[in-house]
Image (cartoon, rainbow, N blue to C red):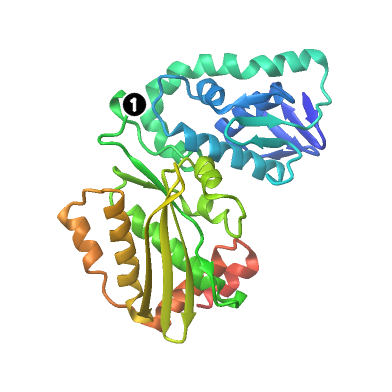
Amino acid sequence: MVKFEDIELDLSSYQLRRNGSVIKLERIPMELLILLAGRNGQLVSRDEIIEKLWGKDVFVDSEHGVNTAIRKIRNALQDDPENPRFIETVVGKGYRFVAPLATPPEEQVSLATSVGHRSHRKRFVLLGGCVLAALSVGAYLGVRYFWPGGTAPGGRTMLAVLPFENLTGDPNQEYFSDGLTEEMITQLGRLDPRQLGVIARTSAMSYKHSSKAVDQIGRELGVNYILEGSARREGGRVRITAQLIQVRDQSHVWAAEYDREMQSVLQLQSEVADAIGNEVRLKLAPAQRAHLTNPGAVNPEAYEAYLKGRYFIEKWTEEGTRVGREY
């Protein structure tokens, strides 16, 4: 039994508990927590994490998988990445477990060797079952695709859409900027997932109001490009600015400003998606291109009600659900 603060990490039952109550944590985040706690106070590099948890010969989007696993551990432990009590990020290097362990020496030895032995025992199972497991594990692991030879045909570009900034100064308009962000994620995600991977909404929205630099966010999410922008809605018109940034050197590779009637908001989103596709050199099939060029018009009132309803429902609270359903 490994203890830190009010947390118990039970290796025999493979459970994480707080004050006796079980905390749900999937296998990969649990393995990572055991690995980090076993090296208490020591830096564990991202490369070592990937090798320990996935191995050298399992071709997955392991970089994003590490980010996802760390986020799930922090959520489970209620840890703040800006002021960590348990998991500290060493930018560009890896992670360090920083909480004091109240653990007998023999348990610490068991903890330190646990992940290595467990990972080796499961290596062949992972190799044999990785395609089937991807459907169930992919949602939390960030696994996108498995490719023969370990590379995506022609290379697969990863993109994150950061929350659009609300420039109205009215916090009651947050639903609109958040809604546009999510619609852009959906629009870009439908282009061609084999060529362009788009980071999920839950991961991207966690950077709302973040003061982190683009290169740091890019490393944490494991992406090549970041799309950021702002939105201002005034009466029946909407103004959007957007810019595409290459994470590698933080260079701006594309930027544009749009000013449209609300009923043309879908056309606006399609134009942004088309521009992004061109910049990252996607080769779209005719049907995919047609989807972008024929988005249709929307009823402004209905679209606004849709954005408001989703905004409140995605707060995942009883009150939010009740208010959201009213739209």
Q: Quadrant of residue 172?
A: bottom right
Task: State the image coordinates of residue 142 (x, y, percent, origin top left).
Answer: 47, 40
Most distant residue in the bottom direction = 235
Of residues 303 and 285, the one nearer the viewer is: 285
Q: Residue at x 58, y 74 (%)?
A: 323
Which quadrant of the rendered structure holds the N terminus?
A: top right
Q: Residue at x 65, y 36 (%)?
A: 89
Q: Residue at x 47, y 18 (%)?
A: 123
Q: Residue at x 38, y 31 (%)?
A: 132
Is residue 48 rendered to the left or right of residue 271?
right
Query: Tag 1's secondary structure?
Result: helix
Q: Is residue 261 visible?
A: yes
Most distant residue in the left direction = 286
Is 93 situated above or below 236?
A: above
Task: State the image coordinates of residue 36 (x, y, percent, origin top left).
Answer: 66, 26
Is 226 situated above or below 269?
A: above
Is residue 287 rendered to the left or right of residue 98?
left
Is residue 74 rendered to the left or right of residue 280?
right
Is 190 situated above or below 91?
A: below
Q: How many marks?
A: 1
Is 38 situated above or below 177?
A: above
Task: State the image coordinates of residue 221 (x, y, percent, origin top left).
Answer: 50, 43
Of residues 48 and 242, the one nearer the viewer is: 242
Kind of residue at disc 1: Gly
Q: Is residue 310 visible?
A: no
Mark 1, Cα crowd under 10 Å, few <14 / some 14-19 / many 20+, is: few
Task: State the image coordinates of residue 135 (x, y, percent, origin top left).
Answer: 40, 38
Q: Quadrant of residue 110?
A: top right
Residue position marked by numbered label 1 in the rendering? 150
